[in-house]
Image (tube, rainbow, N blue to C red):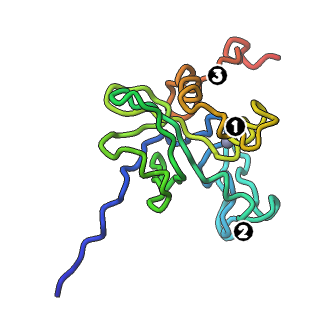
Amino acid sequence: MSTSLPAPPKHKPIQCGGECYCAICGVPFGGYIYQNNNQVRGRQPCPTLKGAKIGYNPRNLGGWDKTAWVRGIYFVGYLPDEDETIMSGKARLVAEGVIELYPDDKRNETIPSEYDYECYRLSEDKITVHPFHWPCLEILARILNPKAVDPVLHIDASELDSSFSSLSNSYTGLELLTGANKRHGKP
Ligand SMILES: [Zn+2]
């Protein structure tokens, strides 16, 4: 009797922080933003933050189909050795800190598998990538190019990645300086 081992994943997983946020809208990719079926039905407690229940009931937002886009992750990054900007196809968070590219999405074939990838954090040995939701990119593109037929085609991926990189070096999202720390919570 022969046993066959499962085929190795086509792409290496991409590392990210315990919480990882869209570089454009700032919403986290993790499923905990929504209650699961057991939590909706009261069979399982919802997670809490500082004592308050967190997680939206997906039924209140139109159901799982209408909220699926929040879990679809795409990313841009720059390969210094090849002086090339990459833009991925669809990916998803499969475990805390682990994003997997969909093997069936042909756009992911342009992502070289010889490198290790990590969201947001700058490092010597990994390629830094910036994750986002595709609808967020479409909205950004529409604002920048309101009259274009397909505004996303007018987005320069290299410039976009460069803008993200200039604000990047935390492990979970962009570092936007709002002055909030200096104000210590005062208006
Ligand atoms: Zn987003």
Q: Amino acid at mark 3?
A: Leu
Residue at the extreme bottom of the image, as rendered: 1
Choose the circle earlier in sequence order: 3 or 1.
1
Residue at (47, 38) in percent of width and height: 86
Is residue 57 found left or right of 96 in the rendered image? right
- Residue at the image position 81 percent from the left and 62 percent from the top: 62
State yes or no: Cβ of the residue under disc 1 lies below 8 Å from any atom of ligand 1.
yes
Front: mark 3 or 2 = 3
Q: Residue at x 72, y 43 (%)?
A: 150
Q: Secondary structure at mark 1?
A: loop
The residue sitting at the top extreme is 182
Measured in 3D between alpha carbons, the distance from the residue under mark 3 to the one under mark 1, in whole angstroms, is: 12 Å
Residue 25 image label: 1
How far apart marks 1 and 2 lie (CA) works out to 30 Å
The residue carrying pointer 3 sits among few (fewer than 14), some (14 to 19) or many (20 or more) residues within 10 Å by Cα, namely: few
Mark with earlier residue (3, 2): 2
Say above or below: 75 vs 96.
above
Rounded to the nearest angstrom, the CA distance separating label 3 from label 2 is 38 Å
- Reading the image, the residue beneath label 2 is 42
Identify the residue position indicated by label 3 in the image: 176
Residue nearest the observer in this picture, 172 or 106 = 106
Amino acid type, label 1? Cys
- Is the Cβ of the residue at disc 3 closer than 8 Å to that at disc 2? no
Label 2 packing within 10 angstroms: few (<14), some (14-19), many (20+): few
Q: Is residue 55 above or below residue 19?
A: below
User: Which mark is first along the chain, 2 or 1?
Assistant: 1
Residue 59, image quadrant: bottom right
